[in-house]
Amino acid sequence: MPYYNFFQQGSAKCLLAVVACLSVSQVLAYEAAHVHGEATLMVAIEGDALEMQLVLPALDVLGFAHGGLSSQAASTASTLTKNELTQVELAQQKLRDTAALFDFESGGCALVDSSVDFSAVLEPGAEHGHSEHEHSDHHSTQHAEVQAGYRFSCQSTKSIELEVNVFSVFPSVEKVQAVYVLDHAQGSVSLSSERRQLIMGE
């Protein structure tokens, strides 16, 4: 599953822990995350390390989504305009601004590293490895995704509370489906602009 890809060089152990805690229904729900207006947030904690992956529809981040085209469509697709490239650059800056996206209210977490992936938009046909027979061009284009990974070092991971402010940074996002795994707890919660608090642990 491409969503569960915390950093290309991330912790496989944390990743497996997240996947292991998901029920079949949860997995199906998260696979639908590229629906316009819906994002996913995967959180895994091991020791003092906290890793997150945020997956958002490109339409909500950029206002357009050219990725995921079939190989035939990609061969005739125009390159991104100067304005669209500017939008990508601005979106990258927003996704790297963790202070705006996440407000840690406990845990004493500090950012160690981050990674932003726009390949589904910048590299036609790359998203999910779909063949041109799996989806229509329109469907694939509408479902292009943007992914961002974050690694934090925390003073305490027994209980972590943060406010997820993705809704303020990307106003067209209406829902963030969050799932988390700690050494001693796990769970999932649906967040919205009215319900932004993610409490993990005790």
Image (spheres, rainbow, N blue to C red):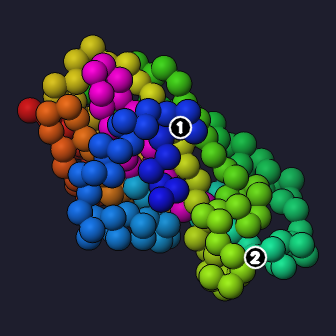
| Residue 73 in the image, given as x and y percentages of width and height | 82, 78
Residue that numbered label 2 is attached to: 70
Nearer to us in this view, 197 or 31: 31
Disc 1 marks a residue whose amino acid type is Phe
Using residue 196 as the reference point, say whether residue 57 is left or right of it. Answer: right
Residue that numbered label 1 is attached to: 7
Nearer to us in this view, 12 or 86: 12
Using residue 191 as the reference point, say whether residue 116 is left or right of it. Answer: right
| Span shown in magenta | 41-58
x 22%, y 24%: residue = 157
Nearer to us in this view, 116 or 10: 10
Position of 56 relative to 9 (above/below): below
x 75%, y 76%: residue = 70
Most prominent secondary structure in the magenta stretch?
A: strand
| Residue 129 in the image, given as x and y percentages of width and height | 65, 65
**Whether residue 164 can be seen here:** no
**Whether residue 8 can be seen here:** yes
x 67%, y 58%: residue = 120
Examine the image and state in which quarter residue 100 appears: top left
| Residue 136 in the image, given as x and y percentages of width and height | 66, 85
From the image, which quarter does the C terminus lie in? top left
Using residue 158 as the reference point, say whether residue 113 is left or right of it. Answer: right
